[in-house]
Amino acid sequence: MRPSAILINESQLGTRLNHAIDHDRRGEFALLLALLSSDARDMAQFQLQDESIDPELALRAKFDLPEKQALVNDLTVQPLPRDNSIAFLEGGARAFQLLEALSPEALVIRGDKSSSMQKVLANCDYLTKQKYKGNTKSVVYDALNTHFVDQLAQQRQMSRVMV
């Protein structure tokens, strides 16, 4: 195997895994396993011969799977997301499960920010969040706009209070 070759599934290894086990080379065995893709769709039995067909659609047709569930609904694009809660209120848990299987609702409903941006903003300080929202007027900027002599006077007053 060439060092520059990309290792995707176990069929590309040939008998190297077996030889590593037979000759008690645990390090090589662990390395080969670590190089394999962790996505189950990359396994050899799921590789399709015709590359012109979308693999996800072909696998859905092969296993007779429904359309995939929308994980996120953006309220700015679709103002009325699917809501199956009425089926639960009227028909109980079984009716809700049936409707959820036939037409699933999104797991998360949010606004126009992507999930990665929401994670980043959750870890930011208040000033950074305000800058992102466009509210640049804050106490920090007011302090920066004061005259240098006034800042020195304020610092002297603070030093007297601290002592």
Image: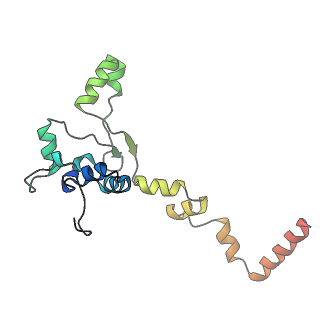
Residue 133 left/right relative to 79: right
Residue 127 left/right relative to 121: right
* Point 73% across, 81% down: residue: 147
Residue 53 seen from this side: yes
The relative height of residue 24 versus residue 133 in the rendered view (above or below) is above
* Point 39% across, 53% down: residue: 112
> Residue 12: x and y, percent?
19, 56
> Residue 114: x and y, percent?
39, 54
The relative height of residue 114 versus residue 147 in the rendered view (above or below) is above
Image quadrant occupied by the N terminus: bottom left
Q: Which residue occupies the foreground of this view, 46 or 24? A: 24
Image quadrant occupied by the C terminus: bottom right
The relative height of residue 59 versus residue 83 in the rendered view (above or below) is below
Counting the numbered discs, the total is: 0
> Residue 117: x and y, percent?
44, 57
Q: Which residue occupies the foreground of this view, 87 or 136? A: 87
